[in-house]
Image (cartoon, rainbow, N blue to C red):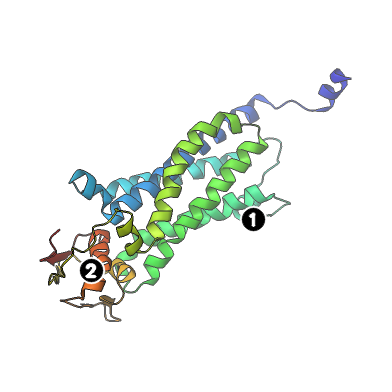
Amino acid sequence: MTASLLAVIPASSPHDTGVRDIAALSARLAYVAMCLTLVWGVLSATGWIRRVTGHEALRSGHVVLATFSLATGAVHGLCYPFLDDGSFGVLALLIPFAGGGVARHAAGVVGLELFVAVSVTAALRRGVTDRRGQRFHQAGYFAVGLLAIHSWLGAAANGNVATVWLGGITVLTPAVVLTVLRVLPPRALVRLGLLEGGTGRAQPVRISVDDKKCHRYAICQAEAPQVFQLQGDGQLRYLRKPGAKQMPLVQAAARACPMRAIRLQGAGR
């Protein structure tokens, strides 16, 4: 009985076996690089690396990791049209559920395409003068979530969950934790001790912004919209002397500024 079943199921050709091995390796590399990209992006954007180490995080490292994630993810996807069995065509690589594709493939297709779109707009963001570019960049969190779902469902379908379990959880856990912390309001982070709060006495604080360093990314506006506002003409308007209640938001904005253009005088930092 067993012999008859083995005779019915065709064995994979050496070519297809090699292609699938390349697809599996590139998928694992893309998964790890993707999680590291998210972690490094959050740590550099929030200034937490500077607070812990005293040194600025290299945002170019975030770009390198994102580029490596895209490259390995593209290799993973492009492997499948080269299979001799014809189980995965070019159309299914571009359009979710095309040709009867399953949910895990659709999650990978949408996640990779969204990741590419976020990366391209981030590279061109110097010309963005409102909050739309920053908001769209945050869609990268959703893209990472879809790709993580795709990775785990694919591992389960191929019987490889036991192989990737330890490594997958190891790199995914910090990414999830930092994503949750990133979306929490600054006051909650102050209570958790992750951001410096105000002292017992309210101290007068004066804000200054270096126009030469400021690239009008509007990240400060996203953190403290009542203090910083990017106008339609590209000019940044801000309160030079914010109230004490705004200080946690202002400090978060100063840490989140990728160009370190915001300076707080008299903040006791």
Q: What is the three-letter code of the residue carrying label 2?
A: Met
Residue nearest the observer in this picture, 51 or 189:
189
Instruction: Give the residue at x 57% y 39%.
Output: 79
| Residue sitting at the far left | 266
Q: Is residue 21 above or below residue 99?
A: above
Assess disc 1: are there few (<14), some (14-19) or many (≥20) residues with their C-alpha within 10 Å of its C-alpha.
Answer: some
Question: Who's the residue at 43% across and 47% down the image?
Answer: 175
Give coordinates of residue 81: x percent, y percent. Answer: 62, 42
Kind of residue sitting beneath label 1 = Pro
Q: Residue furthest bottom?
A: 232
Write down the residue under mark 2. 247
Q: Is residue 6 left or right of residue 31?
A: right
Q: Is residue 197 above or below residue 129?
A: above
Crowd rating for badge 2 (residues with CA inside 10 Å; few <14, some 14–19, many 20+): many
1 vs 2, front mark: 2
Q: Which quadrant holds the N terminus? A: top right
**At which x and y percent is residue 86?**
70, 40
Left or right: 63, with 95 as reference point: left
**Residue at the spot of label 1:** 96
Secondary structure under the numbered disc 1 in the rendered image? loop
Q: Position of residue 13 (x, y in %)?
A: 69, 26
Q: Earlier in the sequence, mark 1 or mark 2?
A: 1
Q: Is residue 164 above or below residue 125?
A: above
The furthest residue to the top: 3
Q: Residue furthest front?
A: 200
Q: Please tell me whether mark 2 sits on a helix, a strand or a loop.
A: helix
The image shows residue 109 at horizontal and vertical percentages of: 58, 52
Q: How many marks?
A: 2
Asked whether residue 62 is in view, the answer is yes
